[in-house]
Image (spheres, rainbow, N blue to C red):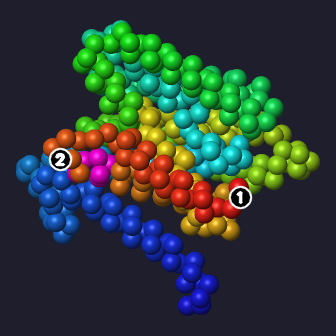
């Protein structure tokens, strides 16, 4: 194996090892602790309590964390490349704020609704918020304008959330705080099966967007000279991001900073690559960040379980600043 080949293989081996360790940790750690070699035997014994914990609690939580992290990583890369801005994040799409407003209205004004109805309502609210951002983003003449419009829509929806929360009682506030900080607590196979089909539908759109990102990265004038309809391409990328992130926000809540951090880690891993090569890395890093943060949320303060979003924000801020400082220019 030549030196260059070994250099290219090293990041893959390191990432694969890290992901495997995180997956094993998510399945084995907790109460009770399960040895990795016992996992097949536990899955083959459906009458035991360990089977219920592994199959009904830890495995769907792990899969939903993988899906959420990978989706947020892809969305972050799509936005940063399409808007040519390293600070673009999914929160500026209005999806998280729209989902939060739908959940807040349902919890406060229709308290008789069962909790199982909240994820579909959050999905509808997220799509409505993302659609509003897409509708207004067509007026943006530059990536900076689009970012400002997205920030304005998100701020308006967040103001609605705060207004509704001012009318909530203590129990409703606790439920809303847990959702708004992002959480994988008590997620089931129903959440996994409701989220996965949306992501499969968005894969063709992501494939279509990838070549456009490389042209958009050259700048609007150059992209226009090459025949690309810049605004239409940018709106297509934003629409794909909305379809990817809304099904994740519905069951998990707004999980902060993953969409910002994962693309930067992907570029740090493959500094001379392009968007096509960065996309799987960004998805993988997003999954690792979410699963590591969820492990910390679940285990560090037992028996109290902390919100997932608090840990992703803590890790994201520190690692994001460190990563950006290592990059001399965008």
Residue drawn at (72%, 47%) of the image: 84
Examine the image and state in which quarter residue 4 appears. bottom right
Whole-number angstrom distance, CA of label 1 to CA of label 2: 42 Å
Q: Residue at x 84, y 44 (%)?
A: 220
Disc 1 + disc 2, Cβ < 8 Å = no
Q: Is residue 23 above or below residue 147?
A: below
Report x, y in % for residue 32: 12, 54
Q: Residue at x 60, y 59 (%)?
A: 325
| Magenta region | 294-299
Q: On the rendered image, what quadrant is the C terminus found in? A: bottom right
Which residue is identified by label 2? 302
Q: Which residue is mark 1?
A: 329
The overriding secondary structure of the stretch rendered in magenta is helix
Left or right: 241, with 254 as reference point: right
Numbered disc 1: secondary structure: loop
Q: Is residue 41 in the magenta section? A: no
Q: Residue at x 63, y 24 (%)?
A: 152
Mark 2 Cα-neighbour bin, 10 Å: few <14, some 14–19, many ≥20: few
Q: x and y percent of residue 128 in the render?
A: 55, 22
Q: Which of 291/257 is in front?
A: 257
- Nearest the viewer among 184 and 309 is 309
Q: Quadrant for the N terminus, please.
A: bottom right
Query: Going by the image, does 215 lie left or right of 283?
Result: right
Left or right, 270 with reference to 221: left
Q: Is residue 276 left or right of residue 315?
A: right
Residue 192 seen by the camera: no
Q: Where is 1 relative to 116, above or below?
A: below
């Amino acid at each position: 194996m030549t030196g260059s080949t070994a250099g290219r293989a090293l990041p893959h081996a390191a990432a694969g090892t890290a992901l495997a360790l995180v997956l094993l940790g998510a399945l084995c750690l907790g109460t009770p602790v399960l040895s990795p070699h016992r996992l097949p035997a536990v899955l083959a014994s459906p009458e035991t309590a360990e089977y219920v914990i592994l199959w009904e609690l830890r495995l769907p939580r792990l899969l939903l964390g993988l899906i959420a992290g990978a989706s947020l990583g892809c969305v972050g890369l799509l936005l940063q490349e399409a808007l040519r801005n390293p600070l673009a994040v999914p929160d500026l799409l209005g999806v998280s704020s729209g989902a939060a407003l739908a959940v807040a209205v349902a919890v406060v004004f229709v308290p008789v609704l069962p909790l199982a109805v909240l994820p579909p309502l959050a999905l509808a609210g997220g799509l409505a918020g993302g659609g509003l951002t897409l509708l207004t983003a067509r007026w943006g003449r530059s990536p900076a304008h689009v970012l400002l419009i997205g920030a304005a829509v998100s701020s308006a929806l967040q103001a609605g959330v705060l207004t509704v929360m001012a009318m909530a009682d203590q129990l409703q506030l606790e439920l809303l705080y847990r959702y708004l900080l992002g959480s994988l607590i008590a997620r089931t196979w129903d959440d996994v099966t409701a989220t996965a089909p949306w992501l499969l539908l968005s894969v063709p759109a992501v494939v279509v967007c990838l070549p456009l990102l490389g042209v958009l990265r050259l700048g609007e004038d150059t992209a226009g000279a090459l025949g690309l309809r810049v605004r239409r391409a940018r709106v297509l990328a934003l629409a794909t991001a909305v379809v990817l992130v809304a099904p994740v926000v519905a069951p998990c809540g707004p999980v902060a900073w993953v969409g910002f951090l994962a693309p930067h880690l992907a570029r740090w891993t493959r500094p001379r690559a392009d968007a096509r090569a960065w996309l799987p890395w960004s998805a993988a890093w997003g999954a690792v960040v979410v699963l590591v943060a969820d492990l910390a949320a679940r285990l560090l303060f037992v028996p109290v379980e902390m919100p997932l979003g608090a840990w992703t924000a803590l890790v994201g801020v520190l690692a994001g600043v460190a990563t950006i400082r290592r990059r001399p220019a965008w």
